[in-house]
Image (cartoon, helix red, strand yellow):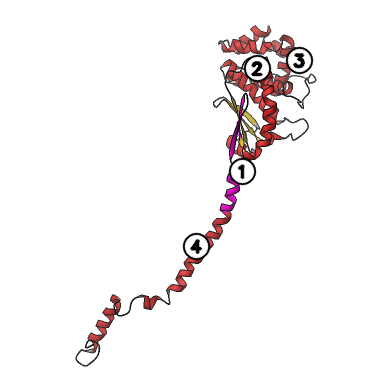
């Protein structure tokens, strides 16, 4: 007490010692001075946390259904392995029941498919276009030995549009050519042959096809690749009418044995590609 009262200690010393004790927190702890400041600060931090939480929760809520929608399933059939989003199971069930029979028809025409399964990936259309960025709705990838299809193909956009099973069979025809010749379809033949054969298969092998089994003769452009789908279809239709369906398997066999396409074609059909072009013009 003698430090704080009485005349024996000079006033400046008392003031100095009091300030020292306050600074050290002995006389008055810091909370005694801050208790009025802290409450406004703490709620402000809690307010920031609450605001951030309110922003995050809706995002999380949106993510949960999207994750569920993106859940993938797979289904094996006799010849196909389908990979698809869970909500499209019904479409795949319908598709799978139809396509194994069509695949058997293709084997009857071309020969036994040497690979155990043909994977078919079904993509939501936006995802398909984002991933592959091409103008088609379906394609076969030789590197993966797989078919990729965008869901826009699930239902026809018009009465003459391709249906889903036609897309699969079109691409399966490319897979057959790849598997039976050992060459990428466009490396092993002109584009008109690869696309014409695939178009022929989708029109003639798909059950209840929306396409007629034959089309009215049309003038074929020169060269055949100028319109490979339609010109190619007419060429394949002509060749099969001329030499039978088995001629395709014979052509594939020759190509698999290393014979170049043009030479194998002449050996199989008895005419050159220019002669085929002239025959189609006069059809």
Q: Marks 4 and 2, how far apart in space?
A: 65 Å
Question: Which dot, 4 or 3, sits closer to the camera?
Answer: 4
| 75 within the magenta span | yes
Q: Marks 1 and 2, how far apart in space?
A: 36 Å
Residue indicated by mark 4: 49
Q: Earlier in the sequence, mark 2 or mark 3?
A: 2
Residue indicated by mark 3: 281
Q: Earlier in the sequence, mark 1 or mark 4?
A: 4
Front residue of 245 and 80: 80
- Residue 101 in the image, given as x and y percentages of width and height: 69, 22
Against 2, residue 213 (above or below) is above
**Residue at left 67%, top 11%?**
247
Q: Quadrant of residue 76?
A: top right
Q: Marks 3 and 1, how far apart in space?
A: 52 Å
In this picture, which residue range is highlighted in magenta?
59-83
Q: Residue furthest right?
A: 216
**Residue at left 22%, top 85%?**
13
Q: Quadrant of the C terminus?
A: top right
Q: Marks 4 and 3, how far apart in space?
A: 77 Å
Q: Earlier in the sequence, mark 1 or mark 2?
A: 1
**Residue at left 70%, top 27%?**
98
Q: Secondary structure at mark 1?
A: helix
């Amino acid at each position: 007490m003698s430090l704080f009262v009485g005349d024996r200690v000079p006033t400046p010393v008392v003031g100095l010692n009091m300030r020292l004790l306050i600074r050290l927190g002995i006389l008055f702890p810091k909370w005694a001075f801050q208790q009025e400041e802290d409450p406004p600060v703490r709620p402000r931090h809690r307010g920031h946390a609450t605001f951030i939480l309110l922003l995050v929760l809706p995002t999380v809520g949106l993510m949960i259904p999207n994750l569920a929608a993106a859940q993938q399933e797979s289904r094996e059939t006799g010849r196909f392995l389908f990979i698809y989003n869970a909500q499209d199971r019904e479409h795949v069930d319908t598709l799978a029941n139809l396509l194994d029979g069509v695949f058997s028809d293709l084997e009857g025409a071309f020969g036994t498919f040497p690979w155990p399964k043909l994977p078919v990936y079904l993509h939501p259309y936006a995802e398909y276009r984002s991933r592959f960025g091409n103008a088609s709705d379906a394609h076969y990838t030789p590197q993966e030995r797989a078919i990729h299809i965008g869901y826009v193909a699930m239902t026809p956009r018009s009465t003459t549009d391709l249906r889903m099973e036609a897309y699969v069979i079109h691409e399966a025809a490319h897979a057959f050519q790849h598997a039976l010749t050992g060459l990428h379809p466009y490396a092993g033949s002109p584009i008109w042959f690869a696309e014409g054969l695939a178009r022929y298969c989708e029109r003639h092998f798909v059950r209840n096809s929306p396409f007629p089994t034959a089309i009215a003769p049309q003038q074929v452009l020169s060269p055949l690749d100028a319109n490979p789908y339609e010109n190619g279809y007419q060429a394949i239709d002509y060749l099969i009418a001329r030499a039978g369906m088995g001629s395709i398997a014979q052509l594939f066999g020759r190509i698999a044995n290393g014979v170049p396409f043009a030479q194998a074609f002449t050996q199989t059909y008895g005419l050159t590609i220019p002669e085929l072009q002239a025959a189609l013009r006069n059809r």
